[in-house]
Image (cartoon, rainbow, N blue to C red):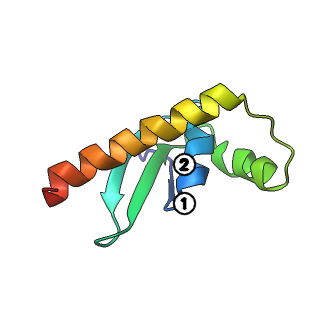
Amino acid sequence: MNQKVYKTTDFYSAVILRTFDVPLLSLEKADRKTLIFVFNDETKTCEALLQKFWDRKLSVEPRAFIETINELKVRIHQFRDKNYGY
């Protein structure tokens, strides 16, 4: 059974997806400076959510957005500490 995933290197796209409770499966290395956010897209909602975001038709609760930014920054630092040793 193949799991449907959505991948992005864009930090704010990842923030939007997490803010709307799309499960973050993992982070992957693209290269030394770039990470790939890998989301579970079983419901195939990622593209639609991001299209609404870019079309300015998506309402986001500000506190949830900020908390998600902080959450993903922590995940990035944990990933880099584990994989790069800094």
What number is the disc on residue 56? none
Position of residue 80 relative to residue 34, above or below, is above
Q: Amino acid at mark 2?
A: Ala
Quadrant showing the C terminus = bottom left
* Residue 31 appears in the figure: yes
Q: Position of residue 82 (x, y in %)?
A: 16, 49
Which residue is found at the position 48% from the left and 34% from the top? 23
Q: Position of residue 22 (x, y in %)?
A: 55, 35
Estimate how packed mark 1 is, as few (under 14), some (14 to 19) or many (20 or more) residues with alpha carbons within 10 Å.
few
Task: Report which residue position mark 1 lands on.
Answer: 10
Q: Nearer the viewer, residue 85 or 42?
A: 85
Q: Which one is nearer the viewer's eye here, 40 or 65?
A: 65
Q: CA distance from mark 2 to mark 1?
A: 6 Å
The residue that appears at 26% across and 44% down in the rendered structure is 78
Q: Nearer the viewer, residue 72 or 20?
A: 72
Do callouts 2 and 1 mark residues in contact (Cβ within 8 Å)? yes
- Total numbered circles: 2
Within 10 Å of disc 2 (Cα), the crowding (few <14, some 14-19, many 20+) is many
Query: Outermost residue, bottom direction?
Result: 31
Q: Is residue 75 left or right of residue 5?
A: left
**Rendered position, 83 above or below 19:** below
Is residue 20 visible from the viewing direction of this image?
A: no
Q: Say left or right for 63 vs 18.
A: right
Residue 49 place in picture, x, y as percent: 72, 44
Q: Is residue 58 left or right of residue 42?
A: right
Q: Is residue 60 rendered to the left or right of residue 78?
A: right
Q: Quadrant for the N terminus, please.
A: top left
Residue, x 44% and y 42% (percent of image)?
72
Residue 16: quarter of image: top right
Q: Secondary structure at mark 2?
A: helix
Residue where numbered disc 2 is placed: 14
Query: Which image quarter: residue 83?
Result: bottom left
